[in-house]
Image: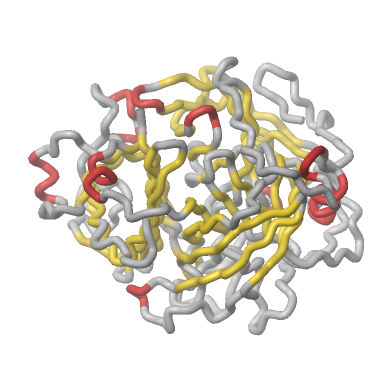
């Protein structure tokens, strides 16, 4: 159950559904709390089409992304998030579900507020209440804002099937409405990108929870996904490191070629739980160490979002890995993955670069010290791409090519300063050549950061290499990109959805 801003959410008023007992119970919910075609042992006679959510109140599953904070409680830094957005009632909330916190016995709202429609399909979000766990009283203390705290945004896909969200002071996170378990008797090929975490600087030693090493860890890959009742199979898993930073091209820790998960009703929706389940003490608040498990949501239009269990406060490791991994490596490294169905034919690059987009640019920063503290130098900014007429100022970003897309951030992250819904022109993406054997994959992309881009600390225009995937969700283009600036040791991700 989610609490909206209009409700009185006391620290004791926490949802306690029967399927909300903890991380260990997510798998039990997946195989025992489902209904209909999602029940174990049942197989639909004919393929079904996932239900498309109706406009109005929608609940979204979202992975943990490095930089997400809520006060000083490290337990709330990690774990997937639950978002609700009510387009009819103009309200939203952000919730967590943590096993390790003794004061949290179910899903807990940590931010709530109001929404308003802006230009080109953008939603502005205003925070009216923030809830932070009090280490002394073991309750959640509320801070209220009147007027609402500004600087938060969301971009939703049609019919609220998924999207992107960024709350002020937090990084962008992908959203998916996991309203039904997938029905894929014929395997669907997905391409995915890792959701990056901070890099480890030279003063740190060993792998920390929630970090990403682009030379040894997965950057992108593909997988064939099929289902039979509540059983979901991830087959032909192929993973690759980032070409521009060296390495062997394959991650040091590769998953099995085939992995099976269980799908069913959880606090996050109808999500797929992947990974070994070993529980010594499932009592909430016990601090029991459980191996990292992946949670995957697939929306009705095909958007895939994964949280890979990274950042578990118990510091548990994934079984059978050497050196031990602190996340489930079925798909993405970092903290998870975002994926798109592989197009059945090569994309029209001219149409792709000619579309208009809203999205976010995320720099994951660098770790030094505690992995539960936000990395140094991380950033996340609202952005628009696809100028219909390229401003003359874009010439200072990069010279035009026939695979270039221009865009940029908004002055002071405030889209109301724009008369046409477009921001600055201080970024450019050169897609390069589409892979001949992998439709929608651009493995030799280049990103240009203009000197005036808000998160450019060098005060000069420069570029770095990247990998991008593209596809269509309900007839609209989606473009996801991942790269590393080796000059400043900075990972970057860009997530763009075609705007209306």
On screen, residue 334 above or below 472: below
Nearer-the-camera pick, 107 or 494: 494
Residue at screen point 49% across, 52% down: 341
| Relative horizontal placement of residue 377, taking residue 22 as reference (left or right) | left
Q: Position of residue 90 (x, y in %)?
A: 55, 18
Residue 394: tell me if it is visible: yes
Split into 4 quadrants, where in the image is the C terminus?
top left
Residue 148 position in % (x across, y down): 52, 22
At x 51% / y 25%, what residue is drawn?
Answer: 126
Q: Is residue 64 left or right of residue 22?
A: left
- Side of 408 relative to 22 (left or right): left
Q: Residue at x 23, y 41 (%)?
A: 354
**Is residue 311 visible in this depiction of the protein?**
no
Q: Residue 346 location, x and y as percent?
A: 33, 55
Left or right of residue 78: residue 314:
right
Residue at the spot 56% in from the left edge and 69% down from the top edge: 237
* Rendered position, 240 above or below 180: below
Residue 284: percent from left, percent from top = 87, 50
Q: Quadrant of the N terminus?
A: top right
């Amino acid at each position: 159950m989610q609490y909206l801003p209009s409700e009185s959410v006391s620290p004791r008023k926490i949802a306690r559904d029967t399927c909300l007992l903890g991380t260990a119970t997510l798998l039990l919910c997946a195989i025992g709390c489902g209904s209909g075609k999602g029940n174990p042992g049942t197989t639909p006679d004919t393929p079904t089409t996932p239900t498309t959510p109706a406009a109005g109140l929608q609940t979204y599953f979202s992975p943990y992304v490095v930089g997400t904070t809520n006060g000083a409680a490290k337990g709330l830094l990690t774990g997937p998030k639950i978002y609700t957005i009510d387009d009819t009632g103009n309200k939203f909330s952000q919730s967590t579900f943590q096993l390790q916190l003794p004061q949290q016995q179910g899903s807990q709202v940590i931010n709530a507020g109001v929404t308003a429609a802006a230009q080109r399909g953008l939603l502005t979000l205003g925070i009216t209440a923030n809830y932070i766990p009090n280490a002394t009283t073991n309750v959640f203390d509320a801070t209220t804002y009147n007027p609402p705290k500004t600087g938060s945004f969301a971009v939703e896909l049609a019919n609220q099937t998924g999207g992107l969200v960024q709350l002020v002071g937090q990084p962008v996170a992908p959203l998916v409405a996991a309203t039904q378990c997938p029905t894929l008797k014929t395997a669907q090929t997905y391409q995915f990108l890792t959701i990056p975490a901070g890099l480890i600087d030279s003063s740190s030693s060993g792998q920390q929870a929630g970090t990403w090493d682009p030379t040894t860890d997965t950057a992108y890959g593909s997988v064939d996904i099929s289902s039979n009742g509540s059983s979901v199979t991830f087959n032909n898993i192929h993973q690759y490191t980032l070409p521009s930073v060296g390495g062997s091209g394959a991650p040091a820790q590769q998953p099995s070629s085939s992995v099976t998960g269980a799908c069913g009703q959880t606090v996050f929706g109808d999500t797929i739980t992947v990974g070994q389940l070993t529980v010594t003490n499932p009592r909430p608040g016990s601090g029991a160490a459980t191996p990292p498990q992946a949670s995957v949501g697939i929306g009705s239009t095909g958007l895939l979002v994964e949280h890979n269990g990274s950042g578990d406060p118990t510091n548990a490791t994934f079984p059978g890995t050497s050196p031990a991994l602190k996340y489930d490596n079925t798909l993405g490294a970092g903290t998870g993955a975002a994926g798109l169905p592989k197009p059945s034919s090569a994309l029209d690059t001219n149409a792709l670069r000619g579309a208009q987009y809203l999205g976010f640019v995320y720099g994951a920063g660098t770790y030094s010290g505690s992995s539960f503290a936000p990395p140094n130098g991380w950033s996340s900014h609202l952005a628009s791409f696809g100028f219909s007429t390229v401003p003359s100022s874009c010439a200072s970003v990069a010279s035009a090519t026939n695979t270039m897309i221009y865009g940029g951030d908004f002055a002071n992250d405030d889209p109301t300063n724009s008369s046409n819904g477009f921001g600055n022109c201080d970024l450019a993406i050169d897609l390069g050549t589409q892979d001949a054997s992998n439709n929608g994959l651009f493995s030799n992309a280049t990103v240009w950061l203009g000197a005036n881009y808000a998160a450019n600390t060098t005060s000069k225009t420069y570029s770095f290499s990247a990998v991008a995937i593209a596809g269509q969700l309900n007839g609209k283009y989606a473009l996801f990109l991942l790269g590393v600036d080796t000059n400043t040791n900075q990972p970057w991700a860009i997530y763009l959805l075609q705007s209306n």
